[in-house]
Image (tube, helix red, strand yellow):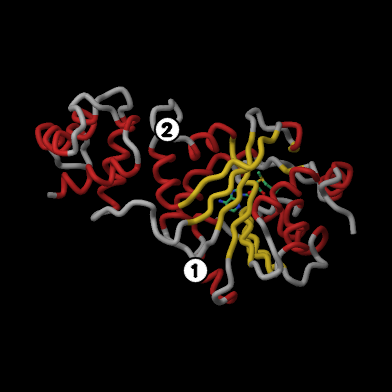
């Protein structure tokens, strides 16, 4: 069987089907076998695993996933790709289910129900236009997922991994770190894709926590505080939270809560750890 990680094979498939890349779907297909092996290794896939792949494209990563995993279910939005996957590049894999649809509108628990209690790992070369919404859906909905190993834009991977006091630190870092443990597995240059994206890429693995590393009385409120704190990055927390339309705290209440926690009233969101935001949220609740 011909592997699509060989660029010649990818070109042959694209020509056979007169395939036109759809920019609106973030289509940058992998054409590098080493990168595919790095993704498989970072995800730590074994024969007991069920893999959910988002956006299989013409099936480059899917082929290797089917060989490494027990079962693979792949959700693809572009209907033009479905016959290529099912009738050609991935037709011989008995452990593969291709689903035509938008992952954002997919009922993931129902999709995974046939696999019972088996561990599920998400693996994907994500469409970059929708990276954050996809990851937040997977994490916030508390889906039965063990880990998420994905190719993303390099800057986005850095934002997910970084801690307080850096320019990349923000709402995404805190959300990702509340639900999971990020690990940056590899940097990937643009020439590993067809067509080449005009940004650098990275493979990141998020190992999903059984329980979050901090406890907070009202998770939703804490994330509203976090969003308000980073919406206006340059403002102090007192002003950022005090002015936020989605919250109803006065500046005095915020200053009082900060004082109670031993933090100066001039502090900015970028200085607070996840534990600090949890404590602030609880203090404001009181
Ligand atoms: N996995 C392939 C590879 O590595 O070569 C393709 C990766 S490409 C970066 C992203 C893929 O996600 C495309 O096939 C695109 O059509 C698909 N896609 C984009 N938006 C999607 C969505 N909302 N739901 C499911 N698939 C989507």
- Give left or right: position of 248 versus 157: left
Q: Which one is nearer the viewer's eye here, 89 or 24?
A: 89
Residue 89: numbered disc: none
Estimate the x, y position of residue 53 in percent, counting from the top left: 64, 57
What is the CA distance from the residue labelled 1 to the residue labelled 2?
Answer: 31 Å
Task: Choose between 253 and 63: the one closer to the eye.
Answer: 253
Query: What residue would you read off at disc 2?
Result: 169
**Camera-side mark, 1 or 2:** 2
Q: Quadrant of the N terminus?
A: bottom right
Circle 1 packing at 10 Å, graded few (<14), some (14-19), many (20+), is: few
Pointer 1 residue? 109
At a point 55% along the width and 32% down the height, the residue shown is: 155
Residue 195 vertical placement versus 95 (above, below): above
The secondary element bearing badge 1 is classed as helix
In the displayed structure, would residue 113 be above or below residue 246?
Answer: below
Vertical placement of residue 82 versus 236, above or below:
below
The mark tally for this picture is 2
Cβ(mark 1) to ligand 1 < 8 Å?
A: no
Tell me which numbered mark, 1 or 2, is placed earlier along the sequence.
1
Compared to residue 96, the image places residue 200 above or below, namely above
- The image quarter containing residue 260 is top left
Query: Viewer-proximal residue, 12 or 225?
Result: 225
Q: Position of residue 6 (x, y in %)?
A: 86, 45
Residue 202 horizontal side relative to residue 117, left or right? right
Locate residue 142, reporting x and y percent. Answer: 43, 61
């Amino acid at each position: 069987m011909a592997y699509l990680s060989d660029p010649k094979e990818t070109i042959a498939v694209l020509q056979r089907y007169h395939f036109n890349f759809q920019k609106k779907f973030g289509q940058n297909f992998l054409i590098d076998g080493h990168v595919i092996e790095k993704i498989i290794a970072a995800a730590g896939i074994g024969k007991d695993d069920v893999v959910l792949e988002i956006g299989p494209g013409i099936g480059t990563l899917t082929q290797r996933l089917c060989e490494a995993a027990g079962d693979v279910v792949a959700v693809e939005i572009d209907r033009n790709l479905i016959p290529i996957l099912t009738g050609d590049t991935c037709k011989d894999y008995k452990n593969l289910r291709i689903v035509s649809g938008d992952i954002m509108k997919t009922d993931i628990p129902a999709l995974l129900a046939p696999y019972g209690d088996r561990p599920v790992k998400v693996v994907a070369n994500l469409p970059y236009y929708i990276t954050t919404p996809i990851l937040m859906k997977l994490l916030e909905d508390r889906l039965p997922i063990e880990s998420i190993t994905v190719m993303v834009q390099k800057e986005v991977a850095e934002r997910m991994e970084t801690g307080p006091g850096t320019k990349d630190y923000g709402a995404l870092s805190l959300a990702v770190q509340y639900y999971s443990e990020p690990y940056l597995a590899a940097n990937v240059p643009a020439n590993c894709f067809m067509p080449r994206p005009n940004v650098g890429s990275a493979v990141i693995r998020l190992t999903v926590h059984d329980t979050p590393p901090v406890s907070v009385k009202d998770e939703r409120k804490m994330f509203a505080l976090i969003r308000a704190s980073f919406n206006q990055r340059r403002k102090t927390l007192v002003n950022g939270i005090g002015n936020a339309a989605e919250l109803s705290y006065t500046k005095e209440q915020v200053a009082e809560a900060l004082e109670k926690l031993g933090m100066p009233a001039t502090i900015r969101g970028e200085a607070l750890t996840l534990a600090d935001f949890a404590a602030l949220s609880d203090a404001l609740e009181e």
